[in-house]
């Protein structure tokens, strides 16, 4: 019983460690997210402009 509980608990702890970043690079992660937001916004604008040009109302 104890061995099964340990086997079940280890993968959970590893996934938590993977998904929770250390406190130091948090600012870097935020900067990357902001850059990605700008990139997504620019691509969305390009797609909308192309859509409007290809499908005139």
Image (tube, rainbow, N blue to C red):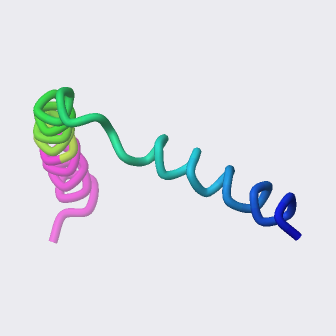
Residue 52 picture location, percent across and down: 18, 58
Q: Position of residue 56 (x, y in %)?
A: 18, 63
Q: Residue, x 20% and y 28% (percent of image)?
A: 25
Which residue: 21% across, 34% down?
29
Report the quarter where the C terminus lies: bottom left
**Highlighted magenta segment, given as a residue range:** 41-57
Above/below status of 31 relative to 11: above
Residue 17, percent across and down? 47, 43
| Above/below status of 48 relative to 32 | below
Provide the major secondary structure of the magenta segment. helix
Instruction: From the viewer's side, name the closer residue of 48 and 9.
Output: 9
The one of 42 and 2 positioned closer to us in this rendering: 2
Q: How many marks?
A: 0
The answer to which quarter of the image holds residue 12 is bottom right
Quadrant of res 48: bottom left
Instruction: From this view, report whether residue 49 is shown above or below residue 52.
Output: above
Q: Nearer the viewer, residue 57 or 10?
A: 10
Residue 6 appears left or right of 22: right
Q: Quadrant of the N terminus?
A: bottom right
| Residue 38 part of the magenta segment | no
In the image, is 52 to the left or to the right of 9?
A: left
Which residue is located at x 27 percent, y 53 percent? 54
Q: Is residue 55 left or right of residue 17?
A: left
- Which residue shows up at 11% across the image and 40% down it? 34
Q: Observer-nearest residue: 51 or 2?
A: 2
**Residue 9 x %, y %:** 67, 59
């Amino acid at each position: 019983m104890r061995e099964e509980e340990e086997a079940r608990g280890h993968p959970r702890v590893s996934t938590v460690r993977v998904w929770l970043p250390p406190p130091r690079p948090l600012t870097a992660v935020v900067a990357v997210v902001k850059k990605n937001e700008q990139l997504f916004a620019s691509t969305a604008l390009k797609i909308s402009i192309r859509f409007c040009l290809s499908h005139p109302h």
